[in-house]
Image (spheres, rainbow, N blue to C red):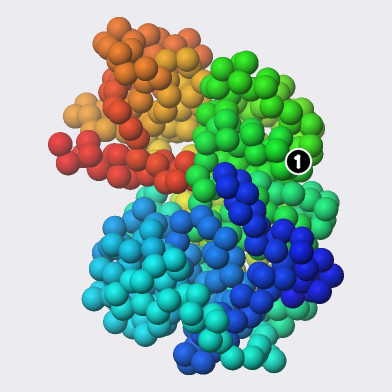
Amino acid sequence: MYPGTHAHRTPDKPAVVMAETGEQLSYRVLDENSARLARVLNDAGLRRGDVVAMLSENRLECFEAYWAALRSGLYINAINTHLGVEEIAHIVNDSGARALVTTAKQAEVAEALVAHTSGVANRYAIDGHLTGHRDYGTALAEAGPRLTHEPRGATMLYSSGTTGEPKGIKTALPDASVSDPGEPITHLLQRMYELTAADVYLSPAPIYHAAPLNWCGALHALGATVVMMKRFDAEGALRAIEHFGITVTQVVPTMFVRMLKLPEKTREAYDMSSLRVAVHAAAPCPTDVKRAMIDWWGPILHEYYGSTEGNGITFIDTEQWLRKPGSVGRAALGTARICDDDGAELGAGEVGLVYFERDHLPFEYHNDPEKTKIAQHPQHPTWTTVGDVGYLDEDGFLYLTDRKSFMIISGGVNIYPQEIESVLTLHPAVDDVAVIGVPDTDMGEQVKAVIKPAHELEASNQLGEELIEYVRSRLAHYKAPRSVDFVTTLPRTATGKLRKGELRDQYVDQ
């Protein structure tokens, strides 16, 4: 289903609520405005398979643009607002976007983009008069009648670029109407988490990322209410759960860490009893962090492992995880395979590249057949990898060790930074941590921990030595950092992923 269905059944039900202000978008208005924008884009000449770029902070109108594309056979390309003008221009041009929807808050970047994105003939600005842009509200008010044919569109998103330049991920458009049943992610959420129209979903992450955007769209397809935060705040999330009676949420592990580090009195002040499903993904979750969240919220934690590429997915619930701590679950989409660098399949417990076997090639990197080829298995082209390393146990549960590109080779021994980061994450003196390999003339690479201390005054050689010993007491000595650097901030995406390549480059270039 889609918003038009729910606009007929429950027109005044909130489709989206802004957590901080209480502003609402009803299903009736979401349906009307997305239909108007679909007509505007159609009259501007956009046709099935064309791309609409969206450059916006978290706000209600994001879903009008999303559903306008989804109900008219277009791709919606939501762009990270924290990127620079040249980076955004590359994504807009690479995607072939013919239209762009933006906001007054993005005015400086949006106006600068005009000179760099000549292929965009149609630009719309929400809440502001931007040079080179048509007023969004006026465009909707002047729109013609609804389209009578509504082929289903799709998202076309770019990877977060934590290991290099963002890559455009394009899937084939379905041969279906937007109102036809069978949209995969909606069906998956119904089956895995029993989500229904009665649910209230908290979305605390930026809407330009794949999981928040697609999950919110799926909840709309079900007729549920999405409560969206402008930006994540640990106490604000707890407040929203209590105030709106949130039943399901999806977070990343850094959000768990931020909530766990709130004073106990603050954490106990909010009622979490409405919450029945708490999903986490997007980055590895240290086992100590997950155990602490289960102790606090109960056995409602669910984890999945997947990627923007959508080549495969695994799921695990609390009961399974307590039996298989550290696992990200068994494959529910595709068949997980572990292979060595030559493509030979490995046995249970052996670490290698994680592939998912499908009966078709599930994605392509837009305008980059070479990157697409690199992601494919050398002998089985429908097996694909995004570069993660891990192993399967004898029961088929997947365990991730790290990204291949992050692996440290010191004295010929493979060391996985994720394991060391997991040990340091909940240390009371650590606010944030990244572990990287830096050049070493004798060993090839040595392990370095880069740490943002919980309190700036704590940064000292003594604390560095204490943290090294802390790791040595919990892991093999060769895995412990040889050195610790203290910083005021670490480069992360807004969803909490470390931009580790950027951090590592700082040391290589020194």
Q: Position of residue 75 (x, y in %)?
A: 53, 76
For image coordinates 45% across by 61% down, the residue present is 56
Q: Is residue 87 visible?
A: yes
Of residues 498 and 228, the one nearer the viewer is: 228
Q: Position of residue 262 (x, y in %)?
A: 55, 22
Q: Is residue 172 visible?
A: no
Quadrant placement of the N terminus: bottom right
For image coordinates 39% across by 14% down, the residue present is 467
* Residue receiving disc 1: 245
Quadrant placement of the C terminus: top left
For image coordinates 33% across by 32% down, the residue present is 489
Q: Position of residue 59 (x, y in %)?
A: 53, 58
| Kind of element beneath mark 1 | loop
Apparent side of residue 142 relative to residue 95 in the rendered image (left or right)? right
Callout 1: 10 Å neighbours few (<14), some, many (20+)?
A: some
Q: Quadrant of residue 406?
A: top left
Q: Position of residue 231 (x, y in %)?
A: 50, 45
Q: Amino acid at mark 1?
A: Gly
Of residues 342 and 390, the one nearer the viewer is: 390
